[in-house]
C-alpha cells in the first residue's frame, strides 16, 4: 500500500520484526521506585510529600510549578523513603522522590471519584483540567505537557488533530502493540479530543509496515465521525511532528512557528490511551509501555512497567546479557541517549531500552568532511548540516543561527548517512543547547 510521505529522509534497517509480534507483558517493580520531579519539558515539579509519608497508587506527589509543567503521581503504594538527587537518563542528578514499594498497589480513592464517563457533558476547560490533573505529557518522548498543547490561544483554530502512529524509530514497537491491544482506548481518547475541538477533524497516520495496525484502527474508527485513518510511507523521520503534518495535510510549519500556527496539533498513540484513562477512569500517568530489544537481551519484549521502575530491573526481566552488551540506549537508536548507568528510573517519556553487542555496534574512525553533500540530500528540514557542523565546532553561533540551525530536529539523518562518520547531529545539539542557555 502506497502511503503519504514528506521530502527527503532515510530508510535505515528497522529491526522491528524482533518485537512487533510480542504482546505487551506486565512487569511489577521491585522494592524501590524513583520519581524525578522533572519528567516533562518545562518547570520541575515541587514535592508535596515528605519522608515517612505513606502514599497510594495514583496519589499526586509532585505539584506542577508553572504553566508549562506536569504533575507527578506515585505508581505504587508505599512509604516515602527520601527526597534526594538521583541520576536520570539525561546524565545529571535531579531532585527525586524515592518510594519504598509495599507491593499492595492500593489506589487512592480520588481516582474513582474523578472519573467522567459522561464526558460529552463537560466543557472544553473541564476536559483539559482533567488532563492537567492527571499529569499527561507527550508519550512519544518529547514529554511536552498535554494540557498546555490543548490550551490553544483564542486567536488560533484547530482544524486537524493528527494522531502519530508512525513509530518510525528502528526497533521500537510499543505504539504498534498499543494500537493492536488497546485500540478501543486510543479511539476513546481521540473522541475526547474531538469534544474539545468540535470543528476539527482527527487523522491517525500509521506507517505501512504496520498493516495489521492500519486494519485494526480503520475497523475501530469506522463509526466515528470526523475521524480518518491513513497509511504513511515507511521512512525516517516520518513520525517527526512537522513531517507528519506535511505528509498528511501538505501544510508546512514555518521556521520559528508551531503546528497550531497552521491549524494543527499532534498527539501520540499512547497519549490517547492516557487521555482516555484520565477522563473516563480518573487515572493519572502511572505506567509506560517500553520496547526492550537488541542482541544484548535474550528475551526482547514489549513490557508495561510502573513509572519509577529501575532500568536495571526492566533489563533483568528481559534477560539482559550484561557481559556481551557494549552500548545501552534510552529511546530509539536515532534520537535516543546512550547511558552508562542502568540504576536510573523509567520516566513518562521512556519509550525503549536497547542493548547492543558488537554484532550491532561498529567502531569506524572519523575522517575529515569530504563535502560530498550526502547530509544535505537527506536532511528533512532542508538544512545544510555540514555547514552547521562546522559553525558549531568553531562556536560561530551567529553564523549557526544564520543557517537556521535552531530549526534542526536532531533526527540524526545526517550522521547516519555521513561517509566520514562525523558526529554532525551531536555538535548541532550542543550548539543549540549553548544558544538556549545564553538566551
Image (cartoon, rainbow, N blue to C red):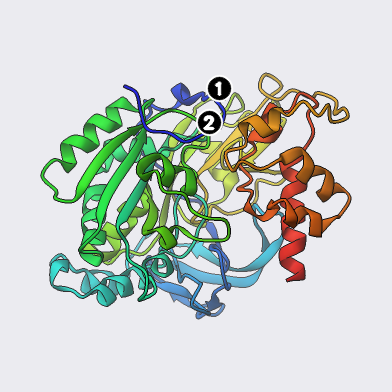
Q: Quadrant of the N terminus?
A: top left
Looking at the image, residue 404 lies above or below residue 169: below
Q: Which residue is mark 2?
A: 170
- Residue 260: mark: none
The quarter of the picture where residue 216 lies is top left
Observer able to see residue 27: no
Q: Residues within 10 Å of mark 1 (few under 14, many from 20)?
A: few
Task: Tell me where residue 329 appears, x and y as whole percent.
Answer: 63, 39
Q: Which residue is mark 1?
A: 13
Observer able to see residue 385: yes
Q: How many marks?
A: 2
Distance from label 2 to label 1 (Cα)? 7 Å
Task: Tell me where residue 301 appears, x and y as whole percent.
Answer: 45, 32
Whether residues under marks 2 and 1 lie with C-beta atoms below 8 angstroms apart, the answer is yes
| Depth order, front residue of 28/43 | 43
The quarter of the picture where residue 334 lies is top right
Amino acid at each position: 500500500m502506497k502511503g503519504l510521505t514528506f521530502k527527503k529522509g532515510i530508510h535505515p534497517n528497522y529491526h522491528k520484526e524482533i518485537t512487533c509480534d510480542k504482546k505487551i507483558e506486565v512487569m511489577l517493580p521491585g522494592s524501590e521506585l524513583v520519581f524525578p520531579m522533572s519528567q516533562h519539558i518545562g518547570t520541575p515539579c515541587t514535592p508535596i510529600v515528605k519522608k515517612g509519608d505513606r502514599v497510594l497508587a495514583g496519589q499526586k506527589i509532585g505539584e506542577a510549578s508553572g504553566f508549562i509543567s506536569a504533575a507527578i503521581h506515585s505508581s505504587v503504594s508505599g512509604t516515602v523513603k527520601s527526597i534526594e538527587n538521583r541520576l536520570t537518563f539525561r546524565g545529571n542528578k535531579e531532585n527525586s522522590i524515592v518510594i519504598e514499594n509495599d507491593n499492595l498497589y492500593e489506589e487512592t480513592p480520588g481516582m474513582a471519584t474523578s472519573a467522567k464517563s459522561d464526558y460529552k457533558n463537560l466543557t472544553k476547560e473541564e476536559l483539559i483540567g482533567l488532563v492537567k490533573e492527571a499529569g499527561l505529557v507527550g508519550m512519544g518522548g518529547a514529554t511536552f505537557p498535554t494540557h498546555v498543547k490543548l490550551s490553544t490561544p483564542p486567536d488560533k483554530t484547530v482544524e486537524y488533530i493528527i494522531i502519530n502512529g508512525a513509530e518510525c524509530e528502528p526497533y521500537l514497537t510499543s505504539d504498534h502493540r498499543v494500537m493492536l491491544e488497546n485500540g478501543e482506548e486510543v479511539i476513546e481518547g481521540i473522541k475526547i479530543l474531538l469534544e474539545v475541538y468540535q470543528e476539527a477533524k482527527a487523522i491517525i497516520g500509521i506507517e505501512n509496515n504496520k498493516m495489521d495496525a492500519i486494519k485494526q484502527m480503520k475497523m475501530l474508527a469506522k463509526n466515528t465521525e470526523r475521524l480518518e485513518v491513513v497509511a504513511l510511507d515507511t521512512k525516517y523521520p516520518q513520525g517527526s511532528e512537522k513531517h507528519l503534518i506535511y505528509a498528511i495535510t501538505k501544510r508546512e510549519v514555518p521556521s520559528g512557528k508551531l503546528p497550531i500556527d497552521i491549524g494543527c496539533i499532534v498527539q501520540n498513540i499512547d497519549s490517547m490511551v492516557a487521555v482516555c484513562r484520565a477522563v473516563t477512569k480518573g487515572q493519572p500517568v502511572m505506567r509506560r509501555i517500553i520496547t526492550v530489544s537488541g542482541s544484548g537481551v535474550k528475551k526482547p519484549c514489549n513490557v508495561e512497567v510502573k513509572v519509577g521502575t529501575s532500568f536495571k530491573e526492566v533489563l533483568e526481566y528481559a534477560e539482559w546479557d550484561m557481559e556481551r552488551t557494549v552500548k545501552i540506549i534510552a529511546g530509539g537508536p536515532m534520537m535516543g541517549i546512550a547511558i552508562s548507568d542502568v540504576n536510573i528510573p523509567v520516566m513518562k517519556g521512556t519509550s525503549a531500552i536497547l542493548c547492543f553487542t558488537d554484532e550491532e555496534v561498529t567502531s569506524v574512525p572519523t575522517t575529515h568532511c569530504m563535502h560530498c553533500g550526502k547530509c544535505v540530500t537527506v536532511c528533512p528540514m532542508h538544512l545544510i548540516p555540514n555547514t552547521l557542523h562546522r559553525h558549531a565546532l568553531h562556536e560561530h553561533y551567529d553564523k549557526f543561527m544564520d543557517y537556521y540551525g535552531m530549526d534542526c530536529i536532531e533526527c540524526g539523518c545526517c550522521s547516519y548517512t555521513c561517509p566520514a562518520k562525523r558526529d554532525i547531529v551531536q555538535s548541532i545539539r550542543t550548539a543549540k543547547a549553548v544558544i538556549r542557555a545564553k538566551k
